[in-house]
Image (spheres, rainbow, N blue to C red):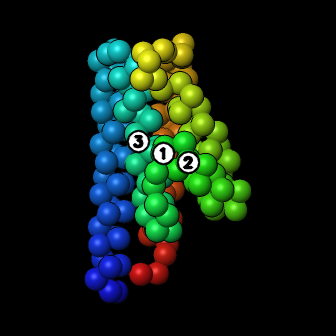
Amino acid sequence: MGHGDKDLKDLENERLKQARESLEEAQALLAEEMDTGSVLTNLYYAYYYSILALMNEGQVPTTMQSVTLGLFEQQYLTTGIFEKEYGDAVRRIFDIKPKCSGEKTPVSTAEVMNLITRAERFIDVVEAHFGSRKR
């Protein structure tokens, strides 16, 4: 493994750590019945940091979030590397996370719980994806 490979692996691991931390924060906020917007923002980043780890794998530059999500769909969903359900979850959380304008999309607690469960599975499959590669 070259020096660059180690740096890339460290960056991927850091992104996955950030994804787990964001997920844990979303779960804690939900358990404390805090503002749904804060829960959704943390949940969004649980998905997004996992996607950034994948973009690092392909050494794809990450620009705007919407572009990064589009590249994820193109490189990992349409190719069948990951199941479509994860793309659906990513699109949904992107649509309902609080906007800069302060506009909020109504969302039920049941839907938030479902997105949390799917985020846990998504992070697991991303970690498994990295674990299955030869370094």
Residue at 34 percent across and 46 percent down: it is: 20
- Which residue was labeled with disc 2? 67
At which x and y percent is residue 85?
65, 43
Q: Residue 64 or 58: which is nearer the viewer? A: 64
Q: Residue at x 68, y 48 (%)?
A: 84
- Is mark 3 in CB contact (under 8 Å) with mark 1? no
The mark that comes first in sequence, 3 or 1, is 3
Upstream in sequence: badge 2 or badge 3: 3
Q: Position of residue 1 (x, y in %)?
A: 34, 86
- Residue at the image point whose x is 41% and y is 42% from the top: 46
Which tag is nearer the camera, tag 2 or tag 3? 2
> Residue at label 3?
46
Residue 98 seen: no
Badge 2 amino acid = Val
**Badge nearest the viewer, 3 or 1:** 1
Residue 22 vs 33, above or below: the answer is below
- 93 relative to 6 in the view: left or right: right
Q: Residues within 10 Å of mark 3 (few under 14, many from 20)?
A: many
Q: Residues within 10 Å of mark 2 (few under 14, many from 20)?
A: few
Look at label 1 and name its amino acid: Met
Left or right, residue 134 beside residue 77: left
Distance Cα–Cα, label 3 vs label 1: 17 Å
Label 1 sits on residue = 64
Q: CA distance from mark 1 to mark 2?
A: 5 Å
Q: Position of residue 71 (x, y in %)?
A: 59, 54
Q: Are marks 1 and 2 in contact (CB under 8 Å)?
A: yes
Residue type at mark 3 is: Ala
Q: Can you give x and y, in whole percent of width and height, for residue 63 in the image? A: 46, 51
Q: Quadrant of residue 10?
A: bottom left
